[in-house]
Image: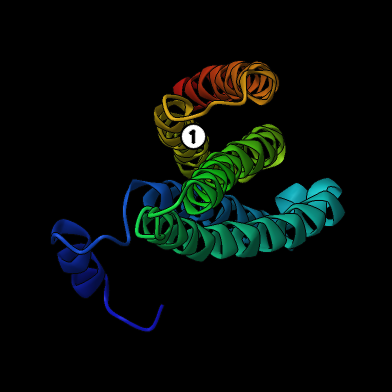
């Protein structure tokens, strides 16, 4: 995290295995939180919005914690991918080794699904914070709240791709059904919240 944006983009565009799309999804979620915090800071202590000071302060604190969670997932996604790739290199000379390798691969795939699913769930929280801030935030920064909503949806949709692609390698059908149901519910919820944010922001911009 101590490298420049240009250095990060250069590494991202290279053939290095990490970071990849999963980490980008988490980073976009953190950007959503930061924008919401910015609008909160532009609302808090402004006399015009005095009735929302306490609520703005609470949102800023929640957004900071959520942003930290996204950054943890940023790194975790890279770790999970590295571990998954390592399982394919496990020995498979005997039947016992083959079974152990297969079990390790399946466990790693499940974790490779759970991390982006967690990004999706955090994105739902980020979208909810953006919606609240869109309702009470400084009108001079209302467009930034709209962008926070867009970033929350982008993070959720992006993480969704990583959930779906790993479904193709799962053998545990019960686990797949449970996760797929949760995945669809979260995606639907985030889309719905995003729609509320977008409509509200556009309405306030036109005033």
Position of 34 relative to 144 (above/below): below
Rendered residue at 67%/56% (across/down): 66
Rendered residue at 54%/41% (across/down): 106
**Which image quadrant: the N terminus?**
bottom left
- Front residue of this view, candidates 206 and 165: 165
Position of 7 relative to 75 (above/below): below
In this picture, residue 90 sits left or right of residue 140:
left
Q: Secondary structure at mark 1?
A: helix
- Provide residue 129's location: percent of width, then percent of height: 68, 41
Rendered residue at 20%/64% (across/down): 16
Disc 1 designates what residue? 146
Rendered residue at 65%/43% (across/down): 122
- Front residue of this view, candidates 25 and 166: 166
Farthest residue in the bottom direction? Answer: 2
- Front residue of this view, candidates 57 and 64: 64
Residue 187: quarter of image: top right
In this picture, residue 19 sits left or right of residue 44:
left
Residue 23: quarter of image: bottom left
In this picture, residue 150 sits left or right of residue 107:
left
- Provide residue 21's location: percent of width, then percent of height: 34, 46
């Amino acid at each position: 995290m101590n490298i420049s944006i240009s250095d990060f983009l250069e590494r991202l565009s290279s053939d290095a295995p990490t970071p990849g799309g999963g980490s980008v999804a988490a980073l976009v979620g953190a950007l959503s939180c930061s924008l919401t915090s910015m609008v909160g800071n532009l609302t808090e202590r402004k006399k015009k919005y005095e009735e929302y000071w306490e609520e703005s302060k609470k949102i800023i604190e929640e957004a900071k914690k959520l942003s930290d969670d996204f950054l943890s997932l940023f790194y975790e996604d890279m770790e999970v991918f590295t571990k998954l790739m390592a399982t394919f290199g496990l020995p498979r000379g005997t039947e016992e080794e083959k079974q152990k390798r297969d079990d390790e691969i399946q466990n790693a795939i499940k974790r490779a699904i759970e991390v982006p699913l967690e990004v999706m769930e955090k994105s739902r929280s980020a979208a909810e914070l953006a919606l609240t801030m869109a309702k009470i935030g400084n009108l001079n920064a209302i467009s930034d709240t709209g962008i926070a909503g867009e970033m929350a949806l982008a993070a959720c949709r992006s993480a969704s791709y990583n959930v779906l692609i790993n479904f193709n390698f799962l053998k545990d059908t019960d686990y797949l059904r449970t996760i797929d149901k949760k995945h669809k519910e979260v995606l639907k919820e985030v889309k719905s919240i995003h729609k509320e944010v977008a409509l509200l922001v556009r309405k306030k911009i036109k005033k």
